[in-house]
Amino acid sequence: MAVMMLEAQASTQRRSSRVFTRIPVSAKGKNVEGRKFRESSQTIVINAHGGLLYLQQALELGSELVLMNPATEEEQECRIVYLGDTSDKGTRVGVEFLSPSPHFWGVEFAQQDWPSRNPSAPAN
């Protein structure tokens, strides 16, 4: 029973810390009708693995988007991993980067958010 509790705790732990911040972002992809779109938005929450933002488009869970950070013009491919409530601001859309990009948002996340290559190495 203790093993099951530890597994449950591990599955609910986040891979990285969350930062509640508004960062302008541009999203492009295909909506549920298969039509291409490009939309400007702002983040609600970010982390080293993705983020949460409002989008007006009707989207499907698991579909892919490309986010662009207008400040750096860097693009990052993402997968939709969460579709939340819809309001006048749009639908809350959670995205996960397809490849690691800890610097995409221009925010330094805590070192524990990205595991070192050698887990047995001492921390400095």
Image (spheres, helix red, strand yellow):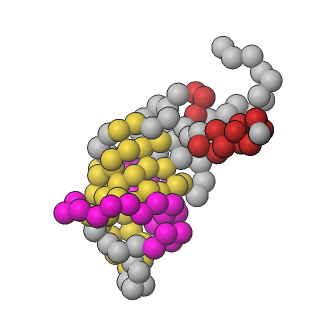
Q: Residue furthest front?
A: 1
Quarter of the image with the N terminus in it? top right
Image quadrant in which you'd find residue 21: top left
On the image, the x and y values in percent for residue 41 come to: 28, 57
> In this view of the protein, can residue 87 be seen by the observer?
yes
Q: Residue at x 35, y 38 (%)?
A: 20
Left or right of 37 in this view: 77: right
On the image, the x and y values in percent for residue 88 come to: 19, 63
> In this view of the protein, can residue 102 be seen by the observer?
no
Q: Toward the viewer: 123 or 12?
A: 12
Q: Residue at x 51, y 60 (%)?
A: 81
Give yes or no for residue 80 being in the magenta stretch: yes
Vertical placement of residue 65 versus 11, above or below: below
Quarter of the image with the C terminus in it? top right
Left or right of 120 in this view: 12: left
Vertical placement of residue 23 versus 115, above or below: below
Left or right of 54 in this view: 31: right
Q: Residue at x 74, y 42 (%)?
A: 4
Q: Main secondary structure of the magenta part?
A: strand
Q: Toward the viewer: 22 or 69?
A: 22
User: How many numbered badges does the structure rendering display?
Assistant: 0
Left or right of 11 in this view: 83: left
Magenta residues, start to end: 60-89
Q: Toward the viewer: 38 or 72?
A: 38
Q: Residue at x 43, y 49 (%)?
A: 51
On the image, the x and y values in percent for residue 85 come to: 33, 61
